[in-house]
Image: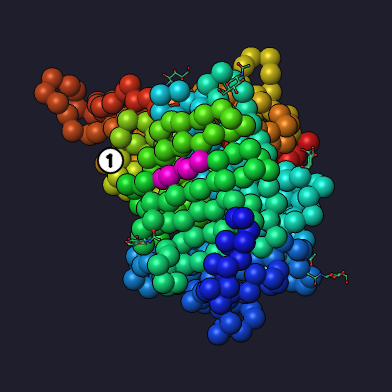
Amino acid sequence: MFQLLLLSALVAQGISALPGHLRPSPSLNARIKRDEYISSEGYQISGEVENGTSKARFDIPTPELTLDSKTLFSLDAPQIDTINGSVFDWWYFDAVSETNPDDSFVITFFASSWEAFPFLNESEPSVLTAWVWASFANGTVFADFVPATVATVRGADVAGTNSSGEWASTGVSWEAKSEDLSRYEITIASEKMGVEGRFTLSSHVPHHLPCGIQEERTTLEVAPHIGWVSLVPDAVGEVDVSILGSKLKFRGPGYHDKNWSDRPFMDSVASWYWGHGRLGPYSIVWFSYFSLEDPTNTTYVSSYVAKDGELLVSACNSSFLSVRPIGSPGTTGGRYPPRVGDVPDGFRLEYDLGEGNGQLNVNVTIRRLVTGDEEYYMRWTGDLTGEVVKSGDERPPGTCAGQKTAKITSGLIGVAVLEQFLLVE
Ligand SMILES: *[C@@H]1O[C@H](CO)[C@@H](O)[C@H](O)[C@H]1NC(C)=O
Ligand SMILES: *[C@@H]1O[C@H](CO)[C@@H](O)[C@H](O)[C@H]1NC(C)=O
Ligand SMILES: *[C@@H]1O[C@H](CO)[C@@H](O)[C@H](O)[C@H]1NC(C)=O
Ligand SMILES: *[C@@H]1O[C@H](CO)[C@@H](O)[C@H](O)[C@H]1NC(C)=O
Ligand SMILES: *[C@@H]1O[C@H](CO)[C@@H](O)[C@H](O)[C@H]1NC(C)=O
Ligand SMILES: *[C@@H]1O[C@H](CO)[C@@H](O)[C@H](O)[C@H]1NC(C)=O
Ligand SMILES: *[C@@H]1O[C@H](CO)[C@@H](O)[C@H](O)[C@H]1NC(C)=O
Ligand SMILES: *[C@@H]1O[C@H](CO)[C@@H](O)[C@H](O)[C@H]1NC(C)=O
Ligand SMILES: *[C@@H]1O[C@H](CO)[C@@H](O)[C@H](O)[C@H]1NC(C)=O
């Protein structure tokens, strides 16, 4: 039934439902040109692995230093022209409960072969899969996926839509409900997974690009060959779904990003820490990464902090953020740089908030393993505690000359979703 409806919807809009290359509208020629990712009718991605070389986009023009709605859509559009066996492109959405971070929900729309991202299911031939992960308050975790034959991603200039993506015919899709990509709705009606319901994000913070918005051209490459944009760094997430007959309903910090690469994940990554959360008025995202075979041993970071919805930091300068694992005595959990199998108890984050804003220190305490093999990959929910330290030279009466004063705002608490990939033995 669903399939029939979808097919007729596609036919009505003049889009072929047959698998094929990722196709901009028929009016554009087969291959997407740099900076011309926008089409009038959307893109199609085939479930089959394509032959030949793929091309990824890793920067956008930003002459105005702002992101207009065309640019925003281009950021939520496919960033790879064709999905061959060694590239990946995906759209990720999550939320964690603000009252009990044991409740969480993640949905990811993948366009990737298993060879390019071996954390997928090896026996699934389609490069298109929609994955759901959920954790319940009592400790039960759920993970499953459903393959698609063709995906359609549309943008703001298709009449009546903003950004939307449909993995046909899985019953799973996303749709942006506003032109500025601050509100999203994900609908799920999948018999195969036994999941149905709705997940919405409503954001009140600016978008995050790996290094913020730069003059003339802005990079989307957070580390060599790794493209990343976080269109929703923090949002009010509302999950109301039924999973194998069990209800999961909560509200809490939500998030949406997408990442992509023009080569296999395992060819790039040595270690990867990422997370997002909210504590008090602060919305935070962290990323800290070592690249494989990097003679310069660079720490790639990306740091994002907004306070009450106002941007404080959106940057990739490694002196603005430090992310370090914390482990129990007698374990390798706190080893840095980390190696395969290191399981931390939490992380210590130190954000430089820039001129006059001080430093935000956050302790992340791991709460629940939601998915992962406990060796190479782990995704958790976590609790956050934090403080802001401002050191000033202004001298209150009664202090000695040269004595610095520190103003500390402590007692910030919150919740997070975080993950690590460790690929060096
Ligand atoms: C890719 O090439 C293989 C081997 O020639 C062929 O079997 C397959 O159908 C091709 N795939 C596509 C999507 O054209
Ligand atoms: C896919 O495209 C990438 C990027 O151009 C290229 O390096 C790679 O060799 C291609 N992979 C295959 C399997 O053709
Ligand atoms: C891969 O998917 C198949 C079919 O859904 C399933 O039977 C199998 O257990 C999955 N493999 C893993 C490693 O999860
Ligand atoms: C797209 O965004 C506009 C403006 O924000 C909104 O009025 C409209 O309802 C949105 N379209 C959909 C399909 O949600
Ligand atoms: C945990 O909660 C889920 C959702 O309500 C339920 O399906 C499951 O049976 C519970 N598991 C245990 C071990 O109580
Ligand atoms: C990449 O994708 C993962 C999903 O596995 C997501 O959790 C993460 O936010 C993304 N991060 C970066 C830096 O690409
Ligand atoms: C690489 O850099 C990290 C962080 O700066 C440091 O802890 C580590 O010792 C360095 N490793 C090597 C091999 O130099
Ligand atoms: C990073 O920040 C430090 C300290 O503010 C500054 O000295 C350095 O120039 C910055 N690096 C880049 C690449 O902007
Ligand atoms: C973080 O943990 C350390 C070590 O337990 C503790 O000294 C510090 O006060 C904590 N900071 C915050 C902000 O919770």
Q: Where is residue 44 in the image (x, y as percent from the top left)?
A: 62, 68
- Name the one closer to the observer, 167 or 113: 167
Q: Is mark 1 within 8 Å of ligand 9?
A: no
Per the rendered image, the range of residues in magenta is 197-201
392 w.r.t. 12: above or below: above
Q: Where is residue 211 in the image (x, y as percent from the top left)?
A: 46, 55
Q: Could you tell whether 298 is left or right of 281 in the image?
A: right
Residue extending farthest to the left is 397
Residue 324 in sight from this viewpoint: no
Magenta stretch prevailing secondary structure:
strand
- Mark 1 lies on a secondary structure that is loop
Q: In which quarter of the image is residue 214?
A: bottom left
Residue 113 in sight from this viewpoint: yes
Question: Which quadrant of the figure contains the C terminus?
Answer: top right
**Is 199 one of the magenta-colored residues?**
yes
Residue positioned 45% across, 23% down in the render: 100
Kind of residue at disc 1: Asp
Residue positioned 41% across, 72% down in the render: 159
User: How many labels sit on residues?
Assistant: 1
In terms of image quarters, where does ligand 2 lie? bottom right
**Is 355 one of the magenta-colored residues?**
no
Q: In which quarter of the image is residue 408?
A: top left
Q: Bin the neighbour count of mark 1 within 10 Å (Cα to Cα): few under 14, some 14-19, many 20 and up.
A: few
- Name the one closer to the observer, 214 or 296: 214
Q: Position of residue 212 (x, y in %)?
A: 42, 56
Q: Position of residue 278 (x, y in %)?
A: 39, 34
- Name the one closer to the observer, 243 or 404: 243
Residue positioned 49% across, 48% down in the render: 186
Q: Name the residue under label 1.
A: 308
Residue positioned 41% across, 45% down in the render: 201
248 w.r.t. 269: above or below: above
